[in-house]
Image (spheres, rainbow, N blue to C red):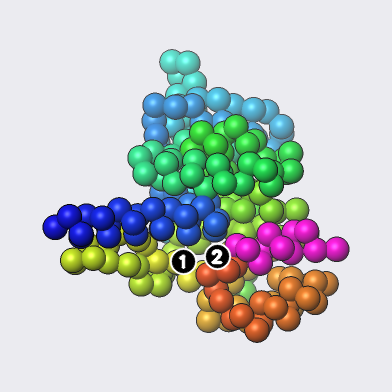
Amino acid sequence: MKTTIKAVAFLLLSSTIIQAQGFLSGFDRFSKKKPAYVTLQNGEEIEGEINDLDRRKGLIEEITLEIGKKKKTFKSSEIKSMYLPASGLSKLNNQMDVATKLDKWDNRSVNLGHINEGYALFELTEVQIKKNTEMLLMQLVNPTSCSKLRVYFDPWAPQTMGVGIGGMTVAGGLDKSYYVSLPNKAAFKLQKKNYVESLPIIFEGCESLIKEAAEEDKWKELATHVETYDKCE
């Protein structure tokens, strides 16, 4: 029994380290006890507690905030970006992720204080959905390395198998897809199965990285590759 407990503890620690080396966690649950910070398309900044979230297919379409004693609803099209407070383990994972990257943070467009307090950053982004494009609120998962390529959480992504002991899952799998956006282009779905053939597109101009990533063919290194590309000249 003690051996099993030790093994579980080790795997939990290991999974935390793995998570800390990757992207920030994708969130689907949010706290109603802490303020959310919303920036509208006209530049107005709003602060208030989350009262309600309306979603469609996992994506936020509307958010209702309690501002003082009043409730106000904002459609996704009105929002430029927003920081929403995560709840539970999502918040803990986010803090652990950011804590390992403080020395790398040089992106002033992202509020480090909010992220390190367990907030998720959503941006209104043009996204390619089949043959059409839509403006959607997407969660940015690479805020420390997004000057060239922005990576967004895919709420529909299947996962690789996790790690389990005695029938209990102690470490989750990797998401098999993300949405990625190059400057002035719509975000598109990047899938694990198409990763190598997509390298010249997502890492355009960084031949050494394209060659290295193709030789490795390791989807689990995507976050590391994105960080390398961010510094590639």
Q: Are marks 1 and 2 in contact (CB under 8 Å)?
A: yes
Residue nearer the viewer, 135 or 118: 118
Q: Is residue 86 above or below residue 198?
A: above
Q: Is residue 69 magenta?
A: no
Q: Residue furthest front?
A: 3
Quadrant of the frame with the C terminus: bottom right
Q: Which mark is residue 217?
A: none
Residue at image point 55% right, 42% down: 99
Q: Which residue is mark 2?
A: 178
| Mark 1 and mark 2: Cα distance apart in space | 7 Å
- Secondary element type, mark 1: loop
Q: Residue furthest left?
A: 1
Residue 61: x percent and y percent? 49, 47
Q: Which residue is mark 1?
A: 175
Residue at image point 66% right, 67% down: 225
Q: Is residue 166 left or right of residue 175?
A: left
Q: Is residue 19 left or right of residue 169?
A: right
Give the residues in magenta: 223-233
Q: Quadrant of residue 133?
A: bottom right
